[in-house]
């Protein structure tokens, strides 16, 4: 199930450094990791600055979901759009739509990390979200872009409004604020290299 999900690494809350960014919504994160929201057919948007732990939490939720024998699909956003485009080109749209629409949990990680979105991005995303919303299947999306910018980034305000309307109707919106873990790790490595010299 782990292999089929598309995850390449196992993340848990045990190795998560809460002290680094004390402003993070800890209680809400723990609540999501119980995976109860998946049984209720709810959604979660993890929005905030790069490096604040959104992907780590999304992967932790995916792992929790897999442990509960729920069919889980994890994709980085650019891979999600590549899969959809490739399916369209090879006549496998039905198969890929089924995969993305019927899993108990779909995670799209780092939406809008790449500024240039595929021309069909809004349609792909809208199709999947509407499908999942009607089936009460959960979606988790992480993004470093505020939801107010989604219409501009998707180049389609109507589609963006429809997507957000469904995600937020039965949804949890978590804001991730603070410093970047990645920059902290990079600084640590640099100082270690200097010490060795």
Image: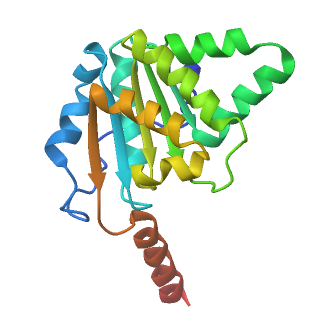
Above or below, 23 against 84 in this view is below
Q: In this rendering, would 43 be left or right of 73?
A: left
Residue projecting furthest to the left: 27
Question: In the picture provided, is 23 more to the left or to the right than 167?
Answer: left
The image quarter containing residue 33 is: top left
Colouring rule applied to residues: rainbow
Identity of the residue drawn at 25% across and 22% down: 37
Look at the image and tell me whether residue 14 can be seen: no
The reply to whether residue 30 is in sight is yes
- Whether residue 98 sits left or right of residue 144 in the image: it is right
* Place of residue 2 in the rendered image (x, y in percent of width and height, measured from the top left): 50, 22
Residue at the (35%, 45%) spot, across then down = 46
Does 92 sit above or below residue 49? Answer: above
Q: Residue furthest front?
A: 158
The answer to which of 56 and 146 lies nearer the viewer is 146
Most extreme residue toward the right is: 90
Please state the horizontal and vertical placement of residue 14, each as a whole percent of the image: 27, 44
Locate the C terminus and report the quarter of the image it occupies.
bottom right
Residue nearer the viewer, 154 or 16 = 154
Q: Residue 63: percent from the left, percent from the top? A: 39, 28
Q: Position of residue 153 (x, y in %)?
A: 57, 51
Q: Is residue 159 left or right of residue 180?
A: right
Q: Depth check: 128 or 179 in front?
A: 128
Quadrant housing residue 43:
top left
Q: Residue at x 50, y 14 (%)?
A: 131
Total marks shown come to 0
Q: Residue at x 40, y 35 (%)?
A: 164
């Amino acid at each position: 199930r782990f292999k089929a999900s598309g995850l390449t690494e196992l993340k848990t809350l045990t190795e998560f450094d809460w002290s680094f960014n004390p402003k993070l919504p800890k209680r809400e994160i723990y609540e999501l990791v119980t995976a109860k929201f998946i049984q209720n057919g709810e959604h979660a948007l993890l929005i905030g600055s790069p490096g604040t732990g959104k992907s780590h939490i999304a992967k932790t939720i995916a792992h929790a979901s897999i442990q509960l024998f729920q069919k889980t699909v994890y994709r980085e956003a650019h891979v999600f759009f590549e899969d959809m485009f490739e399916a369209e080109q090879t006549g496998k749209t039905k198969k890929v739509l089924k995969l993305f629409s019927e899993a108990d949990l779909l995670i799209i990680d780092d939406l809008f990390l790449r500024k240039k979105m595929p021309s069909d991005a809004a349609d792909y995303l809208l199709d999947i979200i509407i499908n999942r919303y009607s089936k009460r299947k959960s979606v988790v999306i992480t993004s470093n872009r505020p939801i107010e910018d989604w219409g501009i980034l998707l180049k389609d305000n109507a589609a963006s409004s429809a997507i957000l309307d469904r995600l937020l109707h039965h949804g949890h919106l978590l804001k991730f604020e603070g410093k970047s873990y990645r920059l902290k790790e990079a600084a640590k490595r640099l100082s270690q290299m200097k010490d060795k010299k």
